[in-house]
Structure formats: structure tokens, C-alpha cells
Image (cartoon, helix red, strand yellow):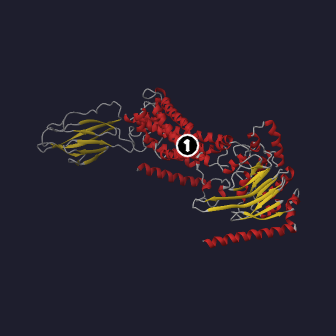
Amino acid sequence: MGDLVIDNLSMRFDLPNGGSVQALKNVSLKLAKGELLAVLGPSGCGKTTLLNIVAGFLAPTDGQVTLNGKKVTGPGPERGMVFQQGALFEWMNVRRNISFGPDMAGRPASETRPIVDNLLRTVGLQDFGEKMIYELSGGMQQRVALARCLANDPDVILMDEPLGALDALTREKMQGLVLKLWKETGKTIILITHSVEEALLLGERLLVMAPRPGRIHKEYRLPFAEMGVGRDLRLVKKEPEFGQRREEILGMIWDMEEEIMGRQEESA
Amino acid sequence: MIVFLLYLVIFGFAYVAYRFWERSRHHIHDFASLKTVTFGDESAVSPNRFASVVSIIALFAIWGAFTGSVITPIHVPGPFVGDTSFTYTARNAAGETDEAVAHIRVYRVGEEVPLPEVSDTPNTFAVDDAVKIGAWRTSLSRLNENDIGGQEDGYSLIAIDGQPIAPGETVRFSDGEVTMTNKGSLSIKPDKGWQMEPIWLPAPEAVLGRLGEIASEGYKNFSLWEHLGYSLGRVVAGFVIGSIIGIPLGYAMGLSNWFRGWFDPIVEFMRPVPPLALIPLIIIWFGIGEEGKVILLFLAALWIMTIAARAGVSGVRISKVHAAYSLGASKWQILRHVIVPNSLPEIFTGARVAMGVCWGTVVAAELVAADRGAGMMIVNASKFQLTDIVILGIILIGIIGYGIDILMRMAEKWLVPWKGRG
């Protein structure tokens, strides 16, 4: 129990011009509680589709997703989402954004207040509770997004390129924060990313997906996430094995992109 | 044309003067002052407040100068007022010539003035004449009527101040022009100058005086505040009803295929119909009372608010809605806490447009038919050539329209501070 099971998912939809797209084909996966899975792949490999199906925003044409033995049929508070950006509510201050989940569930303010205080401290925003969202920098906004998700105490956290829009320095700090939160809360996390380095740093497990049709290309189990907890991530990047893995995966994705280009030229 | 050229001259002169003054002034080194490229950089262009002030002063100066107002020390030449005269030469049937003087008194219309005094003894046979003419007016006179033998055939006027004149010809005298008609009478036209006659354009102080007068005494049975208040009240009533129906309708169109499909043809058809085009139908159906006006303004506001609310819903980032669902919000909670606040900036933009359109529409509707209201006031005044009331009304309508817009902007800043910062 406590598992997220993705069972033989396929997703195929028709296009207005009569053709059809196979976004996912026979994707199966099992995540134990507390695992951190990074998903990597060239654009069009279906990684966002996969995440949307797990979140319950899309229904698969085949297969199913179960969490704790319960089939996923729609979005729910047990599966929290963190988006790239722009998903915060700018008409509320930081505090009300974080307490949005508990508020919607009708929990009293006396109960949510300590939770929010605690989360503000965890993400390092203890002095920003009363600020409006538009007064914060991009990195701070993503901290709020993480805290808002955690306030609901979900079983699984789904992250859709949460650090994609940040500058390199902020991004590095946030990667450390994600690892810290993962270790402290013991949540199951699925993280989608474009960055090979980020996938290697954060992914305890790493899934490389291939496009057309979207499918699992290769799976890794990596030591770097454990290594990076509470440490300077730059040290992790200096590990010889890290460099080796990075080259290997970069080459893999490079080949996929080449293949796509080739196929496009053929059909053109 | 002269006014336009004068305006251009003032514009150019003020600009050159300002540049000279600016050059001699100590410069503030803010960021914009360090930009070398300002032509084409919109962010470096801000309204020059000096220019705004001069612009307003120039408008009033021109208005004052061309109406002989007390607010400007310099005026363009006004119409000739006072006493003047010219000598005319007449030839009688016997072929003899004689001269007499036409004494002309030009007075301001509205004043009581006597005719100028003249002696009625002839030099030989021509007798002096007395004529009074209102400023800006023309007088048709038969100066030969009192001359001895002046009624006989063959008696004619042949020269004015020594300049020969014949039917159809025009000659100048010291303060005006004289034209001889085909029948031999003289059309005397004293100089009009460049100033505008008050019935075309009253002086600024005359307009201000009217404001005081109708503010205390009212116009056509209703006080000024009633006229303006009724216009505003109609706008507010129409706008509020339009919003109450339009905003939920827009939300429904933004949230449901069926509503979107059902109302799209109606909204898309009604949107380009100018509300003014509905006035005749509204009058046929509802008459010229309050009911018809409020319905017209309701229709003017309805489509704008519907489209604004619909656009507000379409403008919600899907990630916000997804995030809210993932946090466990119900559909109703998403509407209340995500969609409505997210659409407020769009709705405020729509409300500003709708209030502007309603204000324009109510004035037009009152021009057509009303017993009170700002539009009724000016159209009624125009029928009696009360140009000062017309101008006063236009200025008040402008000020109120501008005031509405400023209030809406302030409300927007206060209620949706996150606008444009998502």
C-alpha cells in the first residue's frame, strides 16, 4: 500500500484533419511511497501527458492509474500539483495562497494558521506571509507554490517543470529545497524536467522517455539525490559518475532528437 | 482658418520658447535623461506638463481673443461700434449733382440708442440722413428718400466719399462697406472685425455667467442638478441592470458550450449595432419616458459587460484552475475563488467602456426626446440660439464623462491591484 501504480497506460486521440496521435503507448510504472522520480525526454515524448493523467486532468484511452489501490478518475487533493509558474492566485496574499487547500476543505483558521506558519518557515518565507504574490520574485513564488501544495498534505506531489522559468542561480537553490522537502516530508514525488542535470540531481529514479509514440526508453536508479540531501549540490555534480551519466543521457536524448528531425525530413 | 493658423503659431512658439528655457535650466539626471535614443522609445515619452498647461491656456486665450472676453488682455479687432459717416453724391433728374452726409450710429444689439442728430436743410437738393445699425448687422437704406426730388425717375446716387458707385458695386467708406443693390438702394455694412458674434460663440465669462444663472434658477422647469442628475441616474440604472444580467451571462458563456452556442449569435449580432440605432425602436415600443431610456442604456451596457465577463473567464490560466482542483476545490469554489477574481480586471475594463458608451448614448437619447437631462438642455437651448447654454452643456457633459472614467480607474486600482501583474 501507499503505492502509485501506473498500469499499461496508452493515450491516443484523433486530430481534426483525420489523423491521430499516439501520445503514450503501454507505459507501466510502480512508485513506492517516498520515492522521487524524475521524468526526462525530448519535447513531444508525452511526459506532460503522463503527469496530467496521473493528476486526473486527462483520461487515458487504455490502462489505469491507481493510488493506494484507488483508481484515479479526476483531480483530487491527495495528488498535489506544482506548476512552472503563474498558477498562484495573485488576488490573495502568500498566507491565503498557502492555506487555499485547507480553506476549501472548510478547516477552521485556528487549525490552518500553525500549518501555514510552519510551511512559511520551511520554505524560508517567514517574513513574507502578508505580501501579495506579485510583490515576490520568481523563485519566491515557486517556494509559495511548494508550500501551498504541502499544506494539503498530499500523498503524491506532481511537479511539472517547477524550476523551468528560474535563473540558473535561483534554480540551484531551489533544487536543494526540493531535496530537503522530499527528505523531510517523505512524500512521493514525480518531477518532470527538461534539464538532464536537474533530473540527475533530484531523481532517485530517472525515467527517460522517447517520442512517437511516447514510451519509456530507459530507467535508472541513481545515488545523487541521496548524496545531495543537505549538501552543496555543486559537489555532487563534480562526482565522476555524475559526469558519466550526464554524457550518457545527453547522448541518448541527442540521438532521439536526430531521429525526429530525420523522420520529419523524410515525410517532408 | 485664421484661428487654426494662430493656434499653430502659438504651438510652435511655445515649443521653441520651452526648448530655450529648458536649455538654460539645471538638468535633473534621472535615468530617462541619460537615454540617447528617445525617438521611438515609447517608455521615454511622458506628457510634458508645461505643454499641457500652455495648451489649455492657449485654448482659452484664443476663445477669449475672438469673443472680446475680459479674461484676455489682447483681442482681435471687434466689430465697429460708434458713430461714423460718409458723404454721398447724388444726381437729380435735371443732371445736377449735390452732396449730403449719411450719419451712421453702430450700437451693440440690445442697447437702446437714439438716431444720430442731423440737420434736415438741403445743400442744394440732397438732405443728410441718419441711420442706426446693430453691430454685425447690415442696413438696407434708401438715402435718396428724403432728398428733394429723390423719388423721381432719373434721380440716382453716383458716388460714396467721392468714389463712383453703380448698381451691384461695392465701395469702402471709413468704417465699413457700401453695396448698391440693383434697385439703387444702399446696403450699409459696418466693419465686423474678426470677433465672433455672441450668438455664434459667447465669451467664456458669458458661459460662466450662464452656469451661475441656471445653477440657481434652473432651465426649462428643472434645475441644472436635476438635468445632470437625471442623465447620470439613467446611466447608472442602465449600467447596473446591464451588469447584473451581462456578467453572469458572460460567465455562463465562458463556462458552458451550450450557453456559448446559444448566445453567441445574439451577442455577436448585437455587439456591432450602435445603441443609437436602437433609439427609434425603443421610442416606438416604450415611448420617451424613463423606462425607454433605461432600457436603451441597459442594452448598451449589456453586450459590453457580457463580452468582458466572457473574456475574463477565457483569460484564466488553465494551470490556476488545475491547481485549484488539485487542492481539492469544488466547481463552485473554483468559480468563487478563482474565476471571478481572475476576471475582475477584464470586467473593470469592460465597465469603463460601458460607462463611456452609456454616457454618450444617454446624451444622444435626450437629444432625440426628453423632458429633462443634459442632452435635452442643450438641444432645447440650441433652438433658441442660446449658444452659451449649449457650450456650457457640452463642457459639463465632457467634465462628467471624464469624471466617470477617473472614478472607474480609481475603483479599479483599489479593487484589482493585481491587474497586469499576473
Residue A53 versus residue B314: which sits nearer the camera? Answer: A53
Measuring from the top left, give residue A80's x and y in whole percent. 76, 49
Disc 1 sits on a residue from what chain?
B
Number of residue marks: 1
- Mark 1 burial class by Cα count in 10 Å: few <14, some 14-19, many 20+: many
Query: In percent of the image, x 26 and y 48: which residue is there?
Result: B171
In the displayed structure, B381 sits above or below B177; it is above
* Element carrying mark 1: helix
In the displayed structure, A239 sits above or below B7; it is below
Amino acid at the residue labelled 1 = Thr
Residue B79 falls in image quadrant: top left
**Residue B93 visible somewhere in the drawing:** yes
Measuring from the top left, give residue B214's x and y in whole percent. 46, 29
In the displayed structure, A261 sits above or below B195; it is below
Measuring from the top left, give residue A15's x and y in whole percent. 60, 60
Q: Which residue is mark 1?
A: B306
In the displayed structure, B17 sits above or below B110; it is below
Residue B279 versus residue B175: which sits nearer the camera? Answer: B279
**Residue A84 visible somewhere in the drawing:** no
Residue B122 versus residue A28: which sits nearer the camera? Answer: A28
Image position of B253 (left or right of B59)? right
Residue B199 versus residue A149: which sits nearer the camera? Answer: A149
Measuring from the top left, give residue B378's x and y in whole percent. 43, 35
Query: In percent of the image, x 28 and y 32: which residue is there?
Result: B115
Q: Kindly give the residue lying farthest to the left in the view shown.
A: B94
Image position of A8 (left or right of B377)? right
Quarter of the image where the C terminus of chain A is located: bottom right
